[in-house]
Amino acid sequence: MKQRIYIYSPSSAVRNKAALRRSVARLKAMGHEVELDAAALSSHMRFAGDDATRLAAISRAAASGADVAIISRGGYGLSRLLPRLPYDAIARASEHGTRFVGYSDFTALQNAVLAETGAVTWSGPAAAEDLGVEGEPDDIMQACFEDLVAGQGEGTGWQLPRAEALAQPLEVRGPLWGGNLAMVASLVGTPWLPKAKGILFLEDVSEHPYRIERMLTQLLYAGVLEKQKAIVLGQFTNWMPVPHDKGYKLQTVVDWLRASVDVPVLTGLPFGHVPTKVCLPVGAKVTLAAEGRDAFLLWGHRGTHAHGHGGHDHQH
């Protein structure tokens, strides 16, 4: 089914313009109508235009009436816009069926929107970085994104590491929230950290395990982690061990986290700065179910309405 997709740049400048062009061509080849924001290729220092330019782009995305508003790329830039984001416009657009999609730096906007309005946004690919890769995009990522675009996705599943198979089945329900760990940690002490007591999912890139642990300690000491029904860890990639570690590694951090909180901690979620990434509804009520090595996040049919108000749901 043909959908309208709006691509805009709320964070870092797009340096790989060929990748953005490829993403537009690929989305059109899938049969969608694609609109590129007027400032999508703007550049001001490391940003996709100055603050006013990027705020205007976010407002245009919210006013576009598109089925999907997807970021061109992450990077950095949304944190400095949080006091001035058009929260009501984003929430209204979400209510009327626009699915805002992104990850990485976009985590700041997603959690701020959730804290301010309760509106649901989607953690998923970025246009240039994921849909605009040379060669073929990852099959799973593309299938999950197509489900989201069509309003079809109802959940996702993955396998836990063999060593972490559950002895007892797990089933918890609550709002799904989180995203990039550095961005979530940066919201502690601000008005834009959601007060969610639900299922917190986290990922990061280019952060050594000790830095990951340090950000987790911030969330722990701020009282955030103990309030959750479960913590789900995605992919933590692109870091290098150093001789000083002497055996300290990512698993050390996971073991420390499990010993520090009386909350289930699951790993292996296919989400992060990796080719294989699923799409996840930030702010939606979900069920996390796991048995043995099989884990599932289930949110049911959300259709085109972020809050599940029927009437415009797409059916196969």
Image: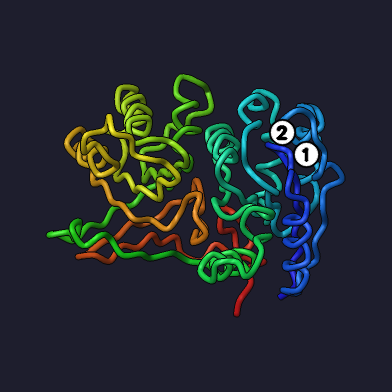
Give the side of residue 24 with respect to residue 246, left or right: right
Viewer-closest of 204 and 102? 204
**Amino acid on which the number 1 mark rests in the picture:** Ser
Tell me if label 1 and label 2 are in contact, CB under 8 Å: yes
In-front residue for pair 301/291: 291
Q: Which residue is mark 1?
A: 59
Residue 190, position in %: x, y? 51, 21
Image-based side of 100 in relation to 196, left or right: right
- Looking at the rendered image, the quarter that the C terminus falls into is bottom right
> Quarter of the image containing the N terminus?
bottom right
The residue to which callout 2 is attached is 86
Mark 1 or mark 2: whose residue is earlier in sequence: 1
- Give the crowd class for mark 2: few <14, some 14-19, many >=20 residues within 10 Å: some
Name which residue lies at 77% across and 56% down. Answer: 18
The residue drawn where x is 28% and y is 51% is 266
Horizontal relation, residue 46 to residue 265: left or right: right
Q: Which mark is residue 175?
A: none
Q: Residue at x 26, y 46 (%)?
A: 265
Toward the bottom, the furthest residue is 316
Residue type of the residue flagged with mark 2 = Pro
Q: Is residue 239 left or right of residue 221?
A: right
- CA–CA distance between discs 1 and 2? 6 Å
Q: For the residue labelled by badge 1, is the local secondary structure a helix, a strand or a loop? A: helix
